């Protein structure tokens, strides 16, 4: 390689490396802000102020879902299996919504510690399988596929 | 020792070589596309919680995975342009940008349709979706930069630098689902046994579709690069001979 070309290649590699470090540090500094949601544990630790518009991600706690007979009102708890957040919502739920399913809710916590959700989204995990495989896994007790779906904190 | 490298960069050599490859590439692409689409639409079992919606994966994942290849490709071509001043590299980089924008847009669109059904929303500003949208804007930026500069060499250099910088975003897209919590799922680990989640009945057709879309990309890139070669080398003797005999 001619020395001139070697020099140009060196400059390019230097700029690319420098930029990567700069972007890496920026993203590292911003990581809290880039997270899509707070976990119930973060809420329990008081990282969230009442009235602040946030998202909370967790699993719909088994046995916690109460839906009204005459309206679209629904109450449930979002959990990360360490802490729970009670959630009130009025509106249409995604088809995937059920107990043990991952959800991301948008809204704010009121002074009573109840999360008033304006939107409920379903979060699913990375495991795809046919109903037969799922039934076989459940029968053998090997999976609780849903438990792997916990949002990482 | 670098002469072979410069020979490799000859537009005439590239034109003749790809002319021989094209029929085979198109044949392989058509076969894989046919097998992949029929398999994905008719024979893949429905998902235990998403049902038939899972079939969107066989479009979404191939387009999304190939979208990540464009910036590295353009960055390598850009480095070759800046260091060795090989024209063919810039022709490939130039034709890759609009293709990349289309593939990225298709990945975003198919994901959006999937999300509207399963998540309950068309769009959310999480790490994965936002970084992918940024890639679409970066690619549109590369295309605009190219067309804004009249001088071919200046445009080549500017686009090469932007492509190398844009490469960083590819790592952000890839690892966004691991670094931050997102609504988008992390990458699915495959199992080979057939008794766990993501078994062969799900990923084998997906691999076929990924190869098919990669071949589609290769064919599209080759066709548009050949076009670019004919345009830029229109004064060369071999192009004029080619046009005369055609």
Image (cartoon, rainbow, N blue to C red):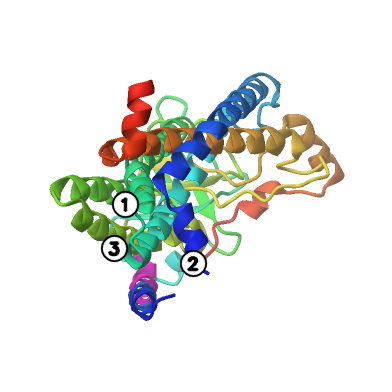
Neighbourhood count class around disc 3 (C-alpha, 10 Å): few under 14, some 14–19, many 20 upward:
some
The foreground one among A13 and A65 is: A13
Majority secondary structure in the magenta region: helix
Q: Position of residue B42 (x, y in %)?
A: 66, 18
Residue at the spot 65% in from the left edge and 34% down from the top edge: B208
Residues shaded magenta: A19-36
Q: Position of residue B145 (x, y in %)?
A: 19, 51
Question: Where is mark 1, residue-wise?
Answer: B134
Verify CB contact (< 8 Å) between mark 3 and mark 2. Answer: no
Q: Are marks 2 and 1 on the same chain?
A: yes
Label placed on residue B2: 2
Question: Where is mark 3, residue-wise?
Answer: B161
Neighbourhood count class around disc 2 (C-alpha, 10 Å): few under 14, some 14–19, many 20 upward:
few
Q: Position of residue A126 (x, y in %)?
A: 61, 46
Residue at the spot 64% in from the left edge and 36% down from the top edge: B206
Label 3 vs 2, first from the N-terminus: 2
The foreground one among A79 and B12 is: B12
Q: Secondary structure at mark 1?
A: helix
């Amino acid at each position: 390689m001619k020395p001139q070309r070697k020099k140009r290649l060196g400059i390019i590699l230097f700029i690319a490396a420098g930029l990567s470090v700069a972007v890496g540090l920026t993203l590292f500094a911003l990581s809290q802000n880039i997270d899509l949601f707070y976990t119930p544990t973060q809420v329990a630790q008081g990282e969230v102020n009442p009235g602040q518009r946030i998202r909370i991600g967790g699993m719909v706690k088994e046995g916690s879902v109460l839906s009204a007979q005459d309206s679209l009102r629904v109450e449930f708890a979002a959990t990360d299996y360490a802490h729970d957040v009670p959630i009130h919502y009025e509106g249409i739920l995604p088809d995937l919504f059920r107990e043990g399913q991952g959800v991301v809710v948008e809204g704010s916590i009121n002074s009573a510690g109840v999360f008033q959700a304006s939107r409920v989204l379903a979060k699913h995990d990375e495991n795809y399988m046919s109903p037969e495989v799922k039934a076989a896994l459940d029968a053998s007790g090997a999976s609780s596929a849903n438990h792997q779906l916990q949002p990482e904190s | 020792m670098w002469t072979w490298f410069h020979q490799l960069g000859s537009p005439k050599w590239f034109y003749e070589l790809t002319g021989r490859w094209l029929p085979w590439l198109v044949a392989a692409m058509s076969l894989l596309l046919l097998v992949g689409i029929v398999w994905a639409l008719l024979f893949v079992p429905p998902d235990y919680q998403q049902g038939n919606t899972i079939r969107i994966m066989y479009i979404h994942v191939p387009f999304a995975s190939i979208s990540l290849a464009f910036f590295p490709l353009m960055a390598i071509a850009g480095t070759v342009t800046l260091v060795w001043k090989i024209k063919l590299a810039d022709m490939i980089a130039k034709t890759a940008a609009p293709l990349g924008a289309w593939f990225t847009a298709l990945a975003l669109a198919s994901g959006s349709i999937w999300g509207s059904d399963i998540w309950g929303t068309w769009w959310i500003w999480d790490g994965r979706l936002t970084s992918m949208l940024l890639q679409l804007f970066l690619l549109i930026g590369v295309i605009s930069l190219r067309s804004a500069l009249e001088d071919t060499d200046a445009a080549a250099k500017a686009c090469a630098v932007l492509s190398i910088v844009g490469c960083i975003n590819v790592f952000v897209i890839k690892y966004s689902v691991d670094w931050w919590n997102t609504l988008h799922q992390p990458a699915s680990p495959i199992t080979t046994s057939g008794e766990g989640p993501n078994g062969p009945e799900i990923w084998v057709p997906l691999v076929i579709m990924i190869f098919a879309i990669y071949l589609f990309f290769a064919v599209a890139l080759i066709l548009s690069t050949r076009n670019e070669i004919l345009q830029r080398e229109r004064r060369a003797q071999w192009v004029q001979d080619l046009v005369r005999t055609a």
